[in-house]
Image (tube, helix red, strand yellow):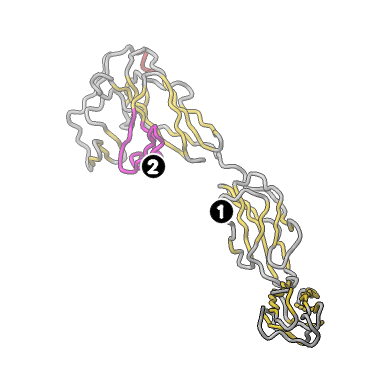
Amino acid sequence: MAQKFLSKKIIIPAIIFFGGLFIAAGVLFLPSILDIAPMAAGQIPQWTQQTGAGLSAPACASMASPPVTTTCNGGIAEATISWIDYYEHDEGVNLDVCKGSWCPLIVYTPAGMYNGSGWDTFSLPAAGSVTLTPLESNTTYLYALRSINTETGVVTVAAAYPDFTTPNCAPPPPGDFNLSLGGGLACNSVPLSWTTSSNADGYRILKGAARVDITPYNPYTALNFTDTSAVQNTDYKYQIEAYNESGDERSNTLNITTPYCPPSLNFSGDPTTIYEGQSSTLTWSSTYTTSCVASGAWSGSKSLNDSQVVIPLPPPSVTYTLTCTGLGGSTGPQSVIINVTPLGLPNWKEIIPR
C-alpha cells in the first residue's frame, strides 16, 4: 500500500524555527519533509528506520550492518559510516554528524571542521561509506542519514539519530625514568642526562625548589641538557618531567652543589726587550681570585687586575713573577722576563731615547 506523508501544515505548541529547521519539544522536522514513493510491504523492514518525529518512513538508502565502525589510527579516533541502496534507486545520501544532546550545536563536515552555529551537511553516493577524522577520543556522536533526490534536492527520508562512541585513543601516560649527571660538574655549568620515558612526547627541564621550567624549546626530545646559568658554590635541584596528552611523569630529583671556580691569571710585559734605562709595562688580569702577590724583581700585594711601569735593572735580563689565589685554589706563579741590552760604555746613561 502506498504511503504519503505531507508537511503542508503541522501544528504543535512551542514550535521554534532555527536555520531552516522546525524544532518542537525536542522533535526535529524538515520543511517539505517526506515525499515517499510506493513500495511493497515486504520491502519495509529493510527500508524503514525510525524517524526523529516518531514516524516510520521508507528509506531508499538503508545503512549496512554494522552502520558505524570506530578505530584508532595513529592515536587519532576515527569512525566509518556505511550504507547501501538495496533497490538501486540511485538517490544521493545526506549525512549529518554531531555531538551533544542537541545536534545543531556541533556538526562534523568532511574537511574536519566543526560549526557551532547550525547544520553543516554534505551529500554522498547512494551506496558507500565515509570516514570521519579526526574525532575526539571516548566521545559519543549522533548522526543522521537522509535519502536525497539528486535532481530536485527533495529530502525523502529523515532518519533518527543513532549514536556511536569513539574508543579511547590516547596513549598510556609516560613511564618511569631516571635523571643523573651527564658528565663532569663545573663551577658554572651542570650537565644533565636522563633515560628514556616510554610514550613521552617531550621533556620539561625543571630547576630549583619552585621547579622553574628552563627548557630551551618545545617539544624538547633530547635526553641531555647543560645548564650554563649556574654559579660557583651554589646548591641546585633538578628534575625532568616527561609528558604526553594522557599525563606526565617526573624523574627523581637531582641535588648538586657547584664547586668553586679555579682562579685564572693572564700576566704580560711590553716591551720585553729594552736598552738599559728604558721602561716596560707589566699588565695582568685574573678571575675567581681574592689576592695576588709579586715576587722576583718586584714584591708586595698587587691588585687583582692592574698594570705597572717598571725600569728593569741590571742587564742582561730581569724576571717579574706574580701569583694569585682564590677560593678554588691558586694560579701561577707566572713570570715575565724583560731582556735588557747594556749601553756601549760603562756608567753611561742614555738621555735621548733611541
Q: Which residue is label 2 attached to?
A: 101
What amino acid is labelled 2 in the image?
Ser
Q: In which quadrant of the rendered view does residue 38 lie? A: top left
Image quadrant where one finds the N terminus: top left
Please tell me which residue lies in front, 244 or 191: 191
Q: Mark 1: give few (<14), some (14-19) or many (20+) Cα within 10 Å.
A: few
The percent position of residue 227, horizontal first and vertical second, equals 65, 61
284 to the left or right of 203 = right
Label 2 Cα crowd, 10 Å radius (few <14 / some 14-19 / many 20+):
few
Which residue corresponds to the image point at 75% horizontal and 77% vertical from the top-left? 326
Q: Which residues are magenta?
A: 96-122
How many dots with numbers? Answer: 2
In the rendered view, would you say 347 is above or below 50?
below
Q: Which residue is mark 1?
A: 217
Say which of 350 and 18 sits in front: 350
Q: Is residue 203 magenta?
A: no
Question: Is residue 103 one of those drawn in magenta?
Answer: yes
Numbered disc 2: secondary structure: loop
Residue 72 in the image: above or below residue 354: above
Measuring 71% from the left and 56% from the top, which residue is drawn there?
Answer: 179
Of residues 200 and 322, which is closer to you in this image?
A: 322
The quadrant in which residue 297 appears is bottom right
The label nearer to you, 2 versus 1, is: 1
- Residue type marked 1: Tyr
Label 1 sits on a secondary structure element that is: loop
Expressed as whole percent of the image width and height from the top left, the position of residue 63 reads 42, 22
* Residue under the point 69% across and 72% down: 234
Residue 244 pos. (x, y %): 58, 48
Check the image and name the residue furthest to the front: 345
Question: Of label 2 and label 1, which has the lower sequence position?
Answer: 2
